Image: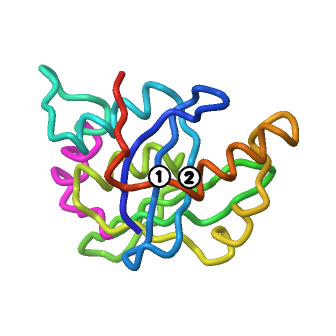
């Protein structure tokens, strides 16, 4: 999957990272905090910060230790919370590091690592309730289904 954009949820005003598969058939929205959204937005928009951000520091540390980020995996969805791993490749083998999806995605953006989502997560995500009442859930579902990649953007 790829990061296709960052948006604000029209119901809750919480930032959402929109992942889309290569065929454009499946979309996965992941709600994140404002700081995490900003870290991803800076990289997606190719904007440099005056000093290294945490994800830049992590990328540089991984490289300095002789490893590479081989991929990011959105691995699970439990009780409405996504779980992810960063897969590091080093001379001695592969290491999986537990990470919040927002941090894993920010690191993937900085290292150009591919993003994978387990099929079970995509199936489970269809039933996640993120709004407080049925009217808000229905409105949010219609909005997600009508997303146009050309309209995506996120401004802090």
Above-or-below relation of 120 to 15 = below
Quadrant containing the N terminus is bottom left
Q: How many marks?
A: 2
- The label on residue 29 is 2
Residue 100 location (% of width, % of height): 54, 46
Q: Based on the displayed image, in which of its 4 quarters is residue 40 positioned? A: top left
Residue 37's spot in the image, x, y percent?
Answer: 42, 34
> Is mark 2 in CB contact (under 8 Å) with mark 1?
yes
Camera-nearest residue between 58 and 107: 107
CA separation in Å, label 2 and label 1: 5 Å
- Image side of residue 112 versus residue 80, left or right: left
The color scheme shown is rainbow
Name the image quarter holding the C terminus.
top left
Q: Is residue 62 left or right of residue 35?
A: left
Q: Looking at the image, is 31 positioned above or below residue 33?
A: below
Q: Is residue 11 magenta?
A: no
Quick one: 139 or 117, which is closer to the camera? Answer: 139
Residues in magenta, as a range: 57-70
Q: Residue at x 25, y 45 (%)?
A: 44
Where residue 73 appears, x then y in whole percent?
A: 49, 66
68 in magenta: yes
At horizontal 53% and vertical 30% (from top left) the residue drawn is 33
Q: Is residue 84 above or below residue 155?
A: below
**Helix, strand or loop at mark 2:** strand
């Amino acid at each position: 999957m790829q990061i296709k954009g960052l948006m604000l949820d029209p119901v809750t005003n919480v930032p959402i990272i929109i992942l889309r598969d290569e065929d454009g058939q499946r979309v996965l929205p992941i709600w994140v905090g404002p700081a995490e959204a900003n870290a991803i937005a800076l990289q997606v928009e190719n904007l440099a910060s005056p000093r290294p951000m945490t994800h830049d520091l992590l990328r540089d540390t991984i490289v300095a230790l002789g490893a590479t980020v081989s991929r990011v995996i959105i691995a699970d969805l439990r009780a409405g919370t996504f779980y992810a791993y960063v897969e590091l490749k080093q001379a001695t083998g592969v290491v999986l590091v537990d990470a919040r999806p927002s941090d894993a995605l920010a690191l993937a953006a900085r290292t150009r690592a591919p993003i994978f989502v387990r099929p079970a997560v995509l199936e489970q995500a269809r039933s996640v309730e993120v709004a407080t009442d049925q009217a808000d859930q229905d409105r949010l579902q219609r909005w997600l289904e009508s997303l146009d990649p050309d309209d995506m953007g996120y401004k802090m």
